[in-house]
Image (tube, grey):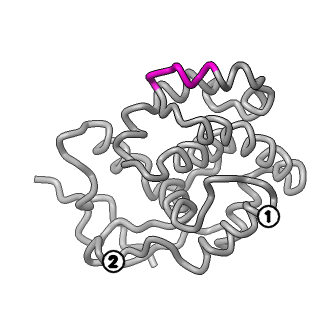
Amino acid sequence: MTQRCSWAKESNPLYVEYHDTEWGVPTHDDQMLFEMIVLEGCQAGLSWETILNKREGYRKAFYSFDVQKVANMSDEELESLRNNPDIVRNRLKINMARKNALVFIGIQKEFGSFNDYIWAYVDHKPIINHWERMDQVPASTPLSDKISKDLKKRGMSFVGSTIIYAYLQSCGLVNDHITSCCCYHGRS
């Protein structure tokens, strides 16, 4: 049997696929970086499995995470999403997508891309941790504290330190696969 990080629920193929092909894999595409910042924010207070199960619904509701289109969504369009059963229908989380899109675009203009902005925090190379057990993996770090503080100052919401640490893991800026996991690469 393939050994994976304990959170990758074998009973959910979406979870296994996400664990095996995305989590901890360096992501440099701005559209994917935007998608993940929205999805991680939507996960606040919920399970990641809930968000993964609704991911296609989010992609349809938010124009495949085209940041310009999300930034241009009207109040009426956002409000209508509160009737969409394919996403989490929390008004604050729905409105966060547009709010964060506007900030994301501002960061792209300032740094050339969001990729350049976020990867500069790790000197443009992933942090590879060497945890033996999932209970060793932190929920937040001084790095996630720093990024969270900057994103909040710029106007993003649902970007607390714990959410940002999960974001760093999901986009591969931090690789927290445990050493016995099939996806651990042992790089240092």
Answer with mark 1 or mark 2, whichever residue precedes in sequence: 2
Identify whether 126 is placed above or below 13. below
Q: Position of residue 127 (x, y in %)?
A: 53, 73
Towards the viewer: 54 or 64: 54
Q: List the residue tagged with mark 2.
A: 131
Check disc 1 and give the amino acid type: Lys
Residue mark closest to the camera, 1 vs 2: 1
Q: Position of residue 86 (x, y in %)?
A: 45, 24
Q: List the residue tagged with mark 1.
A: 153
Q: Which residues are magenta?
A: 80-86
Q: Position of residue 7 (x, y in %)?
A: 27, 57
Side of 44 relative to 147 (left or right) = left
Q: Is residue 147 magenta?
A: no
Measuring 33% from the left and 77% from the top, which residue is drawn there? 131
Measuring 75% from the left and 52% from the top, which residue is drawn there? 114
Q: Residues within 10 Å of mark 1 (few under 14, many from 20)?
A: few
**Which quarter of the figure has residue 97?**
top right
Towards the viewer: 12 or 178: 12
